Amino acid sequence: MPMQKYIRALCHEHHVEMRHKQVLLKMQGEFKQFLTYVCPESGCAVHYNSSEGYFLTTPDGGQIEWDATRRVRCLRDGSPMYLAAVPKRDLRYWRCPQCDTSRTNNDDLLNASSALS
């Protein structure tokens, strides 16, 4: 899972900038090295990888859970987007690590409501 470039991904739980780090994670019964972004908050299991999106791990790295609630995809190329900013409590900016396109959670709400009209 190569990472294209350095990005400023935020943890979707704590809204703090995540750190770029190589970690050892267990997948399908064996441990593998991954380049990922990790939340710096103590005990937080949130990780982000530009090819997989957000995921959660156990403290020992033994189990990976794909975080389906934070699966925001780029409308242009389908890549998993990362949380780039949270300027207000109910507004989130997401950015694509591949094409640099951005969108907000309000865009999703506007698109859904116009589809219903």
Image (spheres, helix red, strand yellow):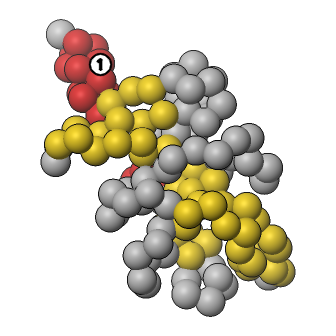
> Which residue is located at x 29 percent, y 18 percent?
111
> Which residue is located at x 18 percent, y 10 percent?
117
In the image, is 33 to the left or to the right of 77?
A: right
Element at label 1: helix
Residue receiving disc 1: 111
Quadrant hosting residue 103: top left
Q: Amino acid at mark 1?
A: Asn
Judging depth in this view, the residue of 52 and 39 nearest the camera is 39
Judging depth in this view, the residue of 24 and 7 nearest the camera is 7
In the image, is 75 to the left or to the right of 16?
A: right
Q: Position of residue 4 (x, y in %)?
A: 74, 41
Q: Is residue 95 above or below residue 67?
A: above
> Which residue is located at x 70 percent, y 41 percent?
5
Q: Position of residue 115 (x, y in %)?
A: 27, 14
Quadrant hosting residue 22: bottom right
Q: Position of residue 89 (x, y in %)?
A: 16, 48
Q: Position of residue 95 (x, y in %)?
A: 48, 34
Judging depth in this view, the residue of 45 and 27 nearest the camera is 45
Count of numbered circles on the image: 1
